[in-house]
Every structure is written in C-alpha cells, then in structure tokens.
Amino acid sequence: MNIIVCIKQVPGTTEIKIDPKTNTLVREGVKSIINPFDCYAVEEGVRLRERYGGKVTVITMGPPQAEEALRETISLGADEAILLSDRAFAGSDTWATSYVLSRAAAKIANYDLIICGKQTLDGDTAQVGPGVSEMLKIPFIAYVSKVEETKDKYIRVQRMVEEGYEVIEATLPAVITVVKEINVPRLPSLRGTMKSKSAKIPVWNAAEIGVEADRAGIPGSPTRVVKIFYPKRTHKSEIFQGTVEEQVSQLAERLEKIV
Ligand SMILES: Cc1cc2nc3c(=O)[nH]c(=O)nc-3n(C[C@H](O)[C@H](O)[C@H](O)COP(=O)(O)OP(=O)(O)OC[C@H]3O[C@@H](n4cnc5c(N)ncnc54)[C@H](O)[C@@H]3O)c2cc1C
C-alpha cells in the first residue's frame, strides 16, 4: 500500500503574533513544530505500511526550513520525504495549497491513500484535505478515528461524529483526514534518527510538478485575509480575597444583587 502523508510546519506556540501590515503570521524567532494532527497522520501511515507493506512518502509545501520537519518524519518511520518549495507558492490560500499538494501527488503517482491531519494549529481551516481530494477527483473521508481494513482497492474506516462513529467504505485511492483518537504516535527510534540524518530530501519546485504560475501563491488564491484582530475584552474579571467561606459569601452577595 503506497501512502502519501501531508504535513505542515506550524509555530510551536499558542501565542501567535500577526503582522498588522501583511495580515500574515510572524514566524521569525518562533520555534516550529510538526502540526500535531499530522503526527497522527504519519503514525497511521507507518502502521498501515507495517500491516500491508508498501511505502510512506511524506510531503509538505513550505519554505526551505520545513525540511527539518520532514527529517523528523523519517525518524518516526516514514520511508521518504519531499519538500515542495518555490517562491511562487508563497502566500497560497487553502485553495492554492490544495492545488500544489495535488500536483505533487499526481507526480508521485501510484498511491493508494493520502492521509492529512484534521486541521492545523495556525490556519485552522480543515480545508486542505477535502481540497486535495476534490482536485484529484478521488473520495474523501474526514475525522477518521480508526482504519478497520483496506482490501481489494477499498478502505473501511470509523469516522467520528458527535454522538459516536460512522463506518464508511470508499474506493481507493482516497484522501482521509485523521483525528487524535486514531493512534498514539511513537517516539523516534535510534535507527530512524540515524536514517533521518543522512536521508536525501528532494525539493520540487513549481515547474517540476507542473504547477501553472497563476494557480499558486497570491495570484492563484481566490481568498485574502483582509483583517485579523484580537477580540476586545468587554468585561473585567475580579478575584475574591479571604477564606473560602468569605469568598463564597461575597459571591452569594453579588449573585443576589443580579437576581
Ligand atoms: C482566506 C485565507 C487566506 C489566506 N491567505 C494567506 C496569505 O495571503 N498568505 C499566507 O501565508 N497564508 C494565507 N492563508 C493561510 C494558508 O491558506 C494556509 O497556511 C494553508 O492554506 C493551509 O491551510 P490550513 O493551515 O488552514 O490547513 P488545514 O486545512 O487546517 O490543514 C489540514 C491538513 O492539511 C495538510 N496541510 C495543510 N497545509 C499543508 C502544507 N502547506 N503542506 C502539506 N500539507 C498541508 C495537513 O495534513 C493538515 O493537517 C490564508 C488562509 C485563508 C483561509
């Protein structure tokens, strides 16, 4: 079973700063990590390869430093990794990102399954997985919490819904996005770490994957972030002082006034 896993490098902090002029994330001086949901995607890819054989190829569209994240996935058991990097990709929205990833998948060819995380920590849209499937015209299943079986070019999975799960079958190749309930990601092995240090990470640019100039980056992005703002605090918090009994009576007094 040949599997492509899509990962994204994101800022490893909850204190994300936005550049007020460009409305984009300030990445300088912020440590980057693999988007947490994508670690589950990598682990599931490796587990499926261990079960059915084949190969796990990890791809990311990002700047040159994203190579570090790809090396990490090799230490976690991926067979190979490819960086999609070109100035023409900068500023891509989810539509253009999905297009670039789908072009890379088309070049890799011969894949059975594409695994993405449910969503990212920074962009947070959950649009890229469905976007890739739409551009490749292959089935898509979101919120996968268990892969029950893949056999004879179909896959059967459990998909999380609010009050339980659904069992869904789709023909392969397909795209799935995974939730954290799917597995517990392993730690890097010593062998994997050694392999990751010497692994060759090819870099594919726009021309190599047949990306048309007006379909990536800002020209290929039909959406723009026009404004980003922090919500204004409209209320003040108050901390009661004293013993627990005193604090409870202060709270009761305050509630009585409201009622
Ligand atoms: C309206 C809009 C406008 C935007 N405009 C800009 C802009 O002008 N400039 C700018 O820098 N950014 C912009 N962005 C952010 C940019 O679109 C996202 O960084 C990117 O498209 C991925 O979207 P996401 O982070 O929401 O991923 P999600 O859809 O939440 O990610 C789901 C999964 O898709 C995969 N995935 C996501 N991104 C990648 C990737 N790069 N490589 C490989 N796999 C990936 C991962 O498996 C991930 O778990 C914009 C976003 C929106 C919604």
Image (cartoon, rainbow, N blue to C red):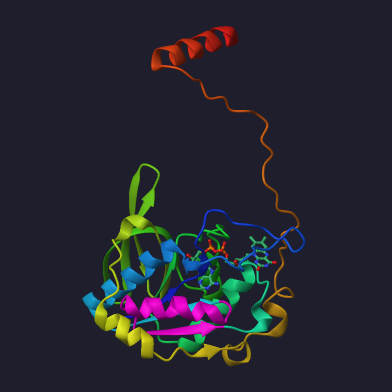
**Camera-side residue of 9 and 166:** 9
Residue 156 in the figure: left or right of residue 141: left
Q: Quadrant of ligand 1?
A: bottom right
> Up-down: is 75 above or below 8?
below
Instruction: Residue at 46%, 79% (x, y): give it.
Output: 68
**Residue stretch in magenta:** 62-84
Judged from this view, the residue extending furthest toward the front is: 242
In percent of width and height, residue 247 lies at 46, 16
Instruction: Residue at 44%, 64% (x, y): give it.
Output: 117
Quadrant that contains the N terminus:
bottom left
Quadrant that contains the C terminus:
top right
In percent of width and height, residue 136 lies at 52, 76
Confirm whether residue 114 shows in the render. yes
Judged from this view, the residue extending furthest toward the left is: 51
**Camera-side residue of 7 and 231:** 231
Find out whether residue 233 is within the magenta segment. no
**Camera-side residue of 159 and 73:** 73
> Up-down: is 9 above or below 241?
below
**Camera-side residue of 30 and 6:** 30
Instruction: Residue at 71%, 63% (x, y): give it.
Output: 223
